[in-house]
């Protein structure tokens, strides 16, 4: 993966940099221009596929490469709102709430990543690349998951439940005497365990709560009873009570607590690396580990123009003078050595 910096504001950039020739040397092209913009520049998929039939060309847009909204600017929160995520996020009796992280953006990137890997596998079999169309709106609609299925198959409109769950009870956060914790009784046995830990054993045999369906139907009075009990002890006291019970529970951590959590540290989720401009930086580590490719050294994000000379020199055999001439007219940026 290399980062190359080019400027489209100079008329010479297209002829000088020759992105069509770069495509011939590349496996994957990822772009997120408004649909049609690269076609105007002669760099659309249909312009490149004849000279680069192997190329995996991935377009990431707001709403898709065609259709009534194709030309609209796309942002995470807009797609999240249009795709239903904001409608189901927030307090039960409150306003819609934006998710704290750009999950629609992140999910679209993961969709694109998976699609690119699948296309590379297909190319390995057929020798031919293809165009991939990923967009924020479609990703968000797909990620609504069972909420969408409830509506499409049963006509059930969604609503907000705060930290709760529409079809599992109890499955939410509770206030303790000094904070919060979250629990999930996903089946009847877990509910019995919860009642035992809370020393509310009678609830497990209460005919109002003997099945999840009954607990959903009698949600309000059950949650009120559990909330009162949880408020009687501190978060740490409840953690000690739950430890070893086999019941799923956890804290609601702030950032300091996230990155001091023993399991997070064990999973090596903090990476330190040397950045040429910022010195030593710390960033979240990768969520996936591989048995065959563990690395102890990690490279920082590239600076602007860091790999321009490497890409043009190694892949397209540009001379130093040719690159300096392009740099002088503003067609490319080369990082100072």
Image (cartoon, helix red, strand yellow):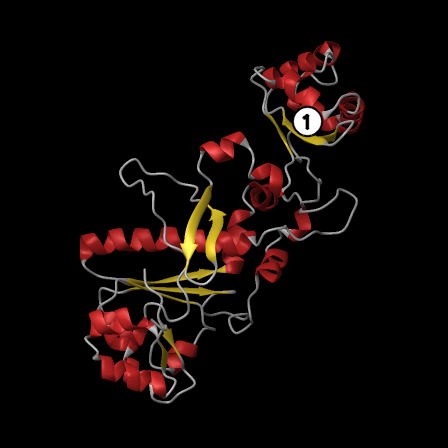
In this rendering, position of residue 325 left or right of residue 282: left
| Residue 68 to residue 127: above or below | below
Quadrant where the image shows the N terminus: bottom left
In the depicted view, which residue is nearer to us: 309 or 336?
A: 336
Q: Where is residue 165 in the image (x, y as percent from the top left)?
A: 66, 35
Residue name at image x 36 percent, y 83 percent: 331
In the picture of the structure, the residue carrying the numbered disc 1 is: 170
Q: Where is residue 116 in the image (x, y as percent from the top left)?
A: 34, 55
Query: Does residue 126 show up?
Result: yes
In the depicted view, which residue is nearer to us: 52 or 239?
A: 239
Q: Where is residue 201 in the image (x, y as percent from the top left)?
A: 72, 10
Q: Position of residue 187 (x, y in %)?
A: 59, 21
| Residue 229 to residue 16: above or below | above
Residue name at image x 50 percent, y 69 percent: 67
In this rendering, position of residue 116 left or right of residue 261: left
Quadrant of the rendered image containing residue 69: bottom right
Query: Does residue 50 show up?
Result: no
The 10 Å Cα crowd at callout 1, few under 14, some 14 to 19, many 20 or more, is many
Quadrant of the rendered image containing residue 246: top right
Label 1 residue SS: loop
| Residue 232 to residue 301: above or below | above
Callout count: 1
Quadrant where the image shows the C terminus: bottom left
In the depicted view, which residue is nearer to us: 161 or 20?
A: 20
In the depicted view, which residue is nearer to us: 292 or 320?
A: 320
Residue name at image x 79 percent, y 29 percent: 220
Residue name at image x 36 percent, y 79 percent: 332
């Amino acid at each position: 993966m290399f980062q190359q910096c080019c400027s489209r504001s100079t008329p010479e950039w297209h002829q000088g940099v020759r992105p069509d020739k770069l495509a011939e040397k590349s496996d994957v092209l990822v772009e997120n221009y408004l649909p049609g913009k690269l076609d105007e520049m002669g760099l659309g998929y249909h312009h490149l596929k004849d000279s680069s039939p192997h190329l995996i060309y991935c377009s990431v847009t707001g709403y898709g490469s065609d259709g009534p909204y194709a030309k609209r600017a796309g942002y995470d929160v807009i797609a999240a709102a249009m795709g239903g995520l904001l409608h189901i996020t927030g307090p039960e009796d409150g306003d819609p709430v934006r998710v704290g992280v750009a999950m629609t953006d992140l999910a679209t990137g993961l969709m694109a990543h998976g699609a690119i890997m699948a296309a590379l596998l297909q190319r390995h079999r057929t020798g031919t690349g293809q165009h991939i169309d990923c967009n924020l709106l479609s990703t968000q609609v797909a990620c609504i998951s069972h909420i969408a299925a409830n509506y499409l198959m049963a006509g059930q409109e969604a609503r907000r439940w705060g930290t709760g769950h529409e079809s599992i009870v109890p499955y939410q956060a509770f206030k303790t005497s000094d904070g919060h914790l979250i629990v999930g009784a996903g089946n009847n046995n877990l509910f019995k365990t919860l009642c035992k830990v809370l020393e509310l054993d009678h609830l497990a045999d209460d005919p109002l709560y003997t099945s999840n369906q009954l607990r959903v139907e009698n949600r309000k009075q059950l949650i009120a009873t559990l909330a009162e009990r949880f408020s009687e002890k501190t978060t740490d006291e409840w953690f000690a009570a739950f430890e070893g019970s086999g019941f799923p529970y956890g804290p609601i951590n702030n950032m300091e607590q996230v990155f001091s959590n023993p399991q997070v540290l064990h999973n090596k989720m903090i990476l330190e690396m040397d950045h040429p401009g910022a010195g030593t930086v710390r960033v979240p580590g990768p969520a996936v580990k591989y048995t065959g490719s563990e690395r102890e050294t990690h490279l920082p994000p590239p600076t602007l123009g860091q790999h321009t000379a490497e890409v043009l020199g190694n892949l397209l055999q540009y001379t130093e003078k040719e690159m300096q001439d392009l740099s002088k007219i503003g067609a490319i940026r080369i990082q100072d050595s």
